[in-house]
Image: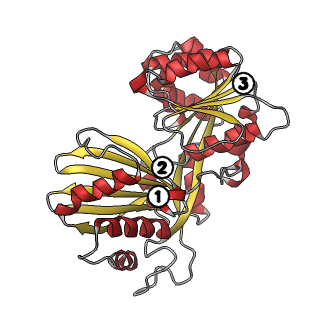
Amino acid sequence: MEIAEKRFQAVDESSSTVEIVDSLLRYASEMGASDVHIDPSEDGVEVRVRYDGTLMPVTVLPSELSSTLVGRFKALADLMAYKKDIPQEGSIHALESGLPATVRVSTYPTMFGERVALRFDTAQGRHRSLDALGLGPAVRTALTRAFDQPQGVILMCGPSGSGKTTTLYSCLQHVVNQPVMRTVFTIEDPIERRVRGATQTQINPNSGLTFARALRSMLRQDPDVILVGEIRDIDTARVVMEAGLTGHLVASTVHAGSSVQVFPRLLEMGVEPFVLTTALCGVSSQRLLRRKCTEPDCGKPHVICLRCKGQGYSGNVVVSEWLPMTAGLRDAILCHGDRQLLTEVAKAEGLVTMLDEARQMVANGITTDEEVERVLGSL
């Protein structure tokens, strides 16, 4: 990271706030960072970037710059500069910034001032095909077949930055590209990427347009395929399941650690076991692992690899799993089986877990045990 720090420190102490922000945006974009964190602390404004899934320090700016830095980002993202006690979200559009990607901006109040998180959407306006995502052949085939179905619910889980949004958009593009036309709707918060051929809506809780309300109204628009950005509450969960039971194909995301954990999560929300087992087609879960750097000189003493910036990794590989709703799983869910029982049943019926796939990647020399432990832990 020494090289990257030197490049950013080209901005000297006499630089204006505008110059510092512009330099930081260019620096993060050029190095291929996915996120930038501007975090005020008692020692100054700490700047970090996320590169290939890991956070790296960049610099610490003087505390007196905190307010003006936040103000500059708010101005670029068209946020309310005078509102400092509430979180805000906006975007710096590529055409306006001159950067190759749209940058999503999020502010958050802390005890030392407002924290800013930037996310670079390098895939804005582009959708990779399912074949190009790097999914395992079994998962890719299963997702293709699931999205070709006329009805049911498809769920995806994974933390922020796991690539699940990219996968969902690729699945939607697959639907839109089919010769048999289907009406496609999305309900999102926020709308992250434009999908040609789909009608997209951003929710607005302040005006009462929640996921559940938008979905109920959308069902009167004669949709065939619906993407709901996230199932956050029982109202949304119930409408999603009902839509899947009444002739619609619905895809959404749920916060859960693995495919199996989605079932107890929805049951805890209040979804009836019979409705869940009848509506749900299957669940996909995925993570991104860093690939081992393949440069011949990488890792040698006193050599800083320019490709991986001395990290030992370059690029990402998807590790994923697909859990279909099988007869055995239905029986276990209807009998209120716990997570352990559901996992045993799923594996007995052929589930290849993310951990299994990741271990095979280690054996093939694609990634390392340390990286698998960092991302998947004891999952």
Asked whether the beta carbons under mark 1 and mark 3 sit within 8 Å of each other, the answer is no
Residue located 50% across and 41% down the image: 158
Position of residue 355 relative to residue 148, above or below, is below
Q: Percent x, y for residue 167?
A: 62, 45
Query: Is residue 347 visible to us here?
Result: yes
Q: Earlier in the sequence, mark 2 or mark 3?
A: 2
> Do callouts 2 and 1 mark residues in contact (Cβ within 8 Å)?
yes
Q: Considering only vertical position in the picture, is 7 above or below 265? A: below
Q: Residues within 10 Å of mark 2 (few under 14, many from 20)?
A: some
The numbered disc on residue 161 is 2
Q: Residue at x 68, y 38 (%)?
A: 172
The residue lying toward the viewer, choosing from 30 and 341, is 30
Name the residue carrying label 3: 224
Q: Position of residue 216 (x, y in %)?
A: 57, 16
Q: Describe the element under mark 2 as helix, strand or loop.
A: loop
Q: Residue at x 68, y 35 (%)?
A: 198
Between residues 23 and 128, which one lies in front from this camera angle?
23
Between disc 2 and disc 1, whose residue precedes? 1
